[in-house]
Image: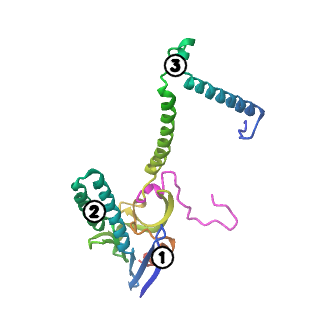
Amino acid sequence: MVVNSPSPLPERAIYGFVLYLGSQFGFFLYCLWAFIPEEWLHSIGLTYWPQKYWALAAPIYLLVTLVIILVLLFGVNMNNTAPLDSLDNMTDVYAKGQKTTDCTKGEYPD
Amino acid sequence: MMEDETFTDISGKAISLSCQDHSSLCKEFVVSVPKVSIGKVMVYTCCVWLLAYAVFFFTENTAVLSSAIFITLVGMMLHIHFVKVDHETLLFIGSLGIQLSSSYASGRETTTFIEMGKIKDIVINEAIYMHQIIYYLCVLLKDPSEPNAVAHVVPLFQSSKPRLNCLVKVYKSCQEILSKC
């Protein structure tokens, strides 16, 4: 049985570094697309790319979604919490009653 | 025998508990919440009316002012009639039942009676309430047809929500009576 542990490993270090390089490069490409004027992009031949409006709109959409997810997470959790008058706060179908037979001193009850 | 000590509710506001022993089998517990303070009412009213005046200043519509006054009055009346609880009472009569009553700030009283045949036990349970875990006293009800299963749970002192020291006092007295009958 392979034991999974969160400790650092050489493979994980490599994955992390590749992800880091990839994300930095992706951001550099995004900045290139956002700042280079449309005419220059057309003159290179890249004509069918999204409008520059999305260079601002997409990150804002993402951040607003993250904030809403945070609020919704708390809300859904609170909604699913059992109210104080519910039987789920006391017991459920898996609860077992305590044995009433006395056990001799030193023995673990079954 | 009357007892009056200062306890607090779950948010730290002071409440008071008074226990009355009518006999060895009959006890009454009254948890009183402090009344609405005049300072708070004045602060709230001033804020709402200043806000309404600010809106009137920009819109020049006098309906804003009169509607603000109307809403404040109606809101306060509804609050003291339906929301603001003055004191909650638990009257425990051994072999007869339990009577729970809440009396509101406007004088309205709601009462429920639970007969002894339906009562399985009175316990202090701990549960998650919003963002915290609180202790609360509750009555476990059983169906007469199935005496070993808990049918319902009735939480007590829901509006005043006292802390554990207050609940323990009530719990101990109730268990004394329950063990006698």
Please tell me whether residue B95 belongs to the stretch shown in magenta: no
Task: Name the mark on residue A38.
Answer: 3
Disc nearest the viewer among 2 and 3: 3
Of B7 and A80, nearer the camera is B7
Residue depicted at x 68% and y 63%: A107
- In this rendering, which labeled residue sits more in front, label 1 or label 2? 2
**Residue A4, image quadrant:** top right
What subunit carries mark 1? Answer: B
Asked if one can make out residue B99 in the rendered structure from this viewpoint, the answer is no
For the residue marked with disc 1, what is the amino acid? Phe
Query: Crowdedness of circle 2 by 10 Å Cα count: few (<14), some, many (20+)?
Result: some
Q: Is residue B122 visible?
A: yes
**Labels 1 and 2: the sequence-earlier one:** 1
Quadrant of residue B14 within the rendered picture: bottom left
Residue at (70, 33) in percent of width and height = A16
Towards the viewer: B161 or B70: B70
Q: Do marks 3 and 1 share a chain? A: no
Q: Residue furthest right?
A: A10
Q: Chain of mark 3?
A: A
Task: Provide residue B99's location: percent of width, then percent of height.
Answer: 33, 73
Q: Characterize the magenta stretch by its predominant secondary structure.
A: loop
> Mark 2 sits on what residue?
B72
Q: CA distance from mark 1 to mark 2?
A: 32 Å
Q: What amino acid is at disc 2?
A: Thr
**Region of the chain picked out in magenta, as a range:** A84-110
Chain identifier of the residue bearing label 2 in the image: B
Total of numbered circles in the picture? 3
Mark 3 lies on a secondary structure that is helix
Q: Which residue is mark 1?
A: B7
Number of other residues with Cα within 10 Å of mark 3, as a class: few under 14, some 14 to 19, many 20 or more: some
